[in-house]
Image: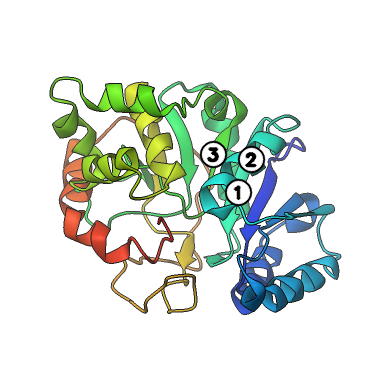
Amino acid sequence: MKQNLPAIALFVYNRPEHTRITIQNLIKNLRSKEYELYVFSDAPKNNHEKSKVKIIRKNIKKIKHFKKLSLIQRQKNLGLYKSIKLGLDYLFVKYEKVIVLEDDIQTNKHFLNYMTKGLEFFNDRKYVGSISGYSFTDEFPKNYKERFYLGYRHSSWGWGTWRKIWKEINWNKNWIKRKSQTKNFSDKFNSGGNDMFHILKEQIKGNINSWSIIFDLNCFLKNKFCLCPKKSLIRNFGFDGSGTHCKKDTNVFDNFDKNFQIKKFKDIKINNKIIKNIKNSFSVSIFHKIKLKLNLI
């Protein structure tokens, strides 16, 4: 592994126990002491959240494990969209590659190694826009032997990308709207899931505030895919009713494997059968089911 390691960005808010578990598992990652961790702590929305935010910040200041730990304490509440955008804008001034986590992501011990090697290998491969530690499917063709695959949908659960990708993202609302109105766009964009165009429309209408669907759109238009593992190296344990506007639900696809690892990468191509399986596993009804959980409003 090269010493030019990616930075780790961790975005936290008001869940002390979830944050503790996320960091605890991150510390268990192989060679985690060699990484620089930046924790972006959003400010409380109201007085009720103040004590939780204070506890999280106090606990983070006690951590001595990483090569460097920086705590960025927001003075006003930004919400996830602005937190992610401003945080990554900040890091990509200094770093070429960044690994991104939120406060409810359990990683296996090979996650950082997988992400680092993936970001290194695919750095010059123009067909990849992000690396994900999450897998969207367990259904693969019988003759598919690789331990990873390409998809149109980019996961926001334990992922990473490069400065060159992030800096070219167009966030302009008018531009997004124009692109969404081009001929046959909806069918093509839904290659990542039957809910993709619907999510984008909700974003354009202002009904949600999702940075990830904009990232998806930009990568889609540039024909850049997400590299995913066959088994997830991360598990989102935030669907337990603890988050803001969050209702309990365990019906989220989970093929987390605590021992899964990928030691070596190679160039691969899109497998249409895998794409079809992922596309059909997502629907508009699923989006509505989890919209509040993802705090998109």
Tell me the element at label 2. Answer: helix
Residue 137, labelled with which disc?
none
> Which residue is identified by label 3?
118
Tell me the element at label 3. Answer: helix
Residue 83, labelled with which disc?
1
Q: Are marks 1 and 2 in contact (CB under 8 Å)?
A: yes
Q: CA distance from mark 2 to mark 3?
A: 24 Å
Q: Quadrant of the N terminus?
A: top right
Expressed as whole percent of the image width and height from the top left, the position of residue 76 reads 68, 55
> Is 187 positioned to the left or the right of 167 in the image?
left
> Is 232 rendered above or below residue 239?
above
Expressed as whole percent of the image width and height from the top left, the position of residue 243 reads 49, 72
Which of the marked residues, 2 or 3, is nearer the chain's N terminus?
2
Which residue shows up at 41% across the image and 55% down it? 296
Q: Residues within 10 Å of mark 3 (few under 14, many from 20)?
A: many
> Is 15 positioned to the left or the right of 177 in the image?
right
